[in-house]
Amino acid sequence: MRVEVAELRRQFPRTRFDHDRHGNPRWYAIDARGKKVRLRGEPGSDAWIAQYKAVLQGAHLEVEGEPTGSLGWLIRLYYQSPEWKALSPVTQQSQRRIYEGIRKASGDMLLADITAANIRAGRDARAETPSAANSRLKRLVTLFNWGLEAGHCTHNPARDVKKLKTPKTGGFHTWTVEECLAFEARHPLGTKARTAYAMTLYLGLRRQDIPRLGPQHRTADGYMRIQRQKKRGEHAPPQEVWICPMLAEALDAAEVTGLTYLQTEYGKPFSVAGLGNKFREWCDDAGLAQCTAHGLRKAVAARMREAGCSIGDIQSVTDHDTSAEVDRYTRDAGRKESSKRALQATFTEHREAKVVPLSHPHSAHRGKKPKKT
């Protein structure tokens, strides 16, 4: 035993070894402050070495209170990674809520002890909300994959755990033309409600992109220059979307006193959450309890598909990353138009074609005896 201890201390400088009062061996690494940090797991194992390196690099200083090599420790390290910092602030905010929930529930669990059974149990405990359970599982898969690549853990226990089946509800309700007209009737041009509605419908905007837009984002050639937030962040090149006449009418009617089209009663730009709450009120005022800002974004995608626009054209407005996302948004609208084209092609031509009566099935053989077989 003494030989093994001496060899490990030679291979891993700044380590210490002792026994607790029960005689159990304990290993430590000495950090930059000269303090001992406990190393858990089998000495010399990959997980043990990952903890040792983290202590020498000072990564443990941000996770005091959670054991080095634990799930909470890994989450905090992920927050410091280039991969995390590359996410947009909006994406970070939504994912951080999930990760902090994981830390609160299981942050002290050691990575080496976490199994697929643990992950599956956590998934099943949230079976009543399958979408939330699947989002949590997705975040764990991403976290452990990053930990493997960074050398902080040795396995991904979430990788082979399947997602729960979710009911096919169609997601957010897609606004109908009648619902759009009802909203417009309740909220005339010049109101904040109508301005927000028009920017969402005619630009295909996500809710988080609306509060920042102002007259300065309109270009001389009739486009709106939009700095999309989701996945892109503040340093990505802006997207330019054409301002149609209906949107121009709504923007020209809006009373603008600052750098944004939409401001609170205190003269401040809306926050993303504040605008979401206000949009809910505006829909309720119009008797549209089933409608949301996100459903309005789905509506513009559906209308474009019904008009025969290509997936690529729709993406240029909605800013979806993949054609699959656009197809998911507009699948029903696409089927509706496809059914019309198919039936028109089939039955319009059939109706216009000259109908030739079928001859009697035996007319070709009249007067002739059938051949024997």
Image: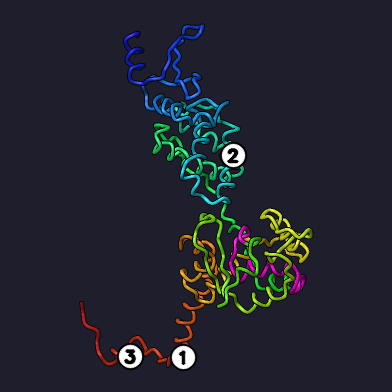
Query: Which disc, if any, is residue 22?
Result: none
Indicate the amino acid at tag 1.
Glu
Indicate the amino acid at tag 2.
Arg
Q: Which residue is mark 3?
A: 363
Q: CA distance from mark 2 to mark 1?
A: 59 Å
Query: Where residue 83 sits in the image (x, y, percent)?
Result: 46, 45
Which comes before the other along the chain, label 2 or label 1? 2
Does 361 sit left or right of 174 as displayed? Answer: left
Which comes before the other along the chain, label 2 or label 3? 2
SS at badge 2: loop
Tally of numbered tags: 3
Q: Which residue is mark 1?
A: 352
Magenta region, residue range: 185-209
SS at badge 1: helix
Asked if disc 2 and disc 3 are in contact, CB closer than 8 Å, the reply is: no
Is residue 59 depicted above or below 350 in this figure?
A: above
Query: Where residue 86 sits in the image (x, y, percent)?
Result: 48, 49
Which comes before the other along the chain, label 3 or label 1? 1
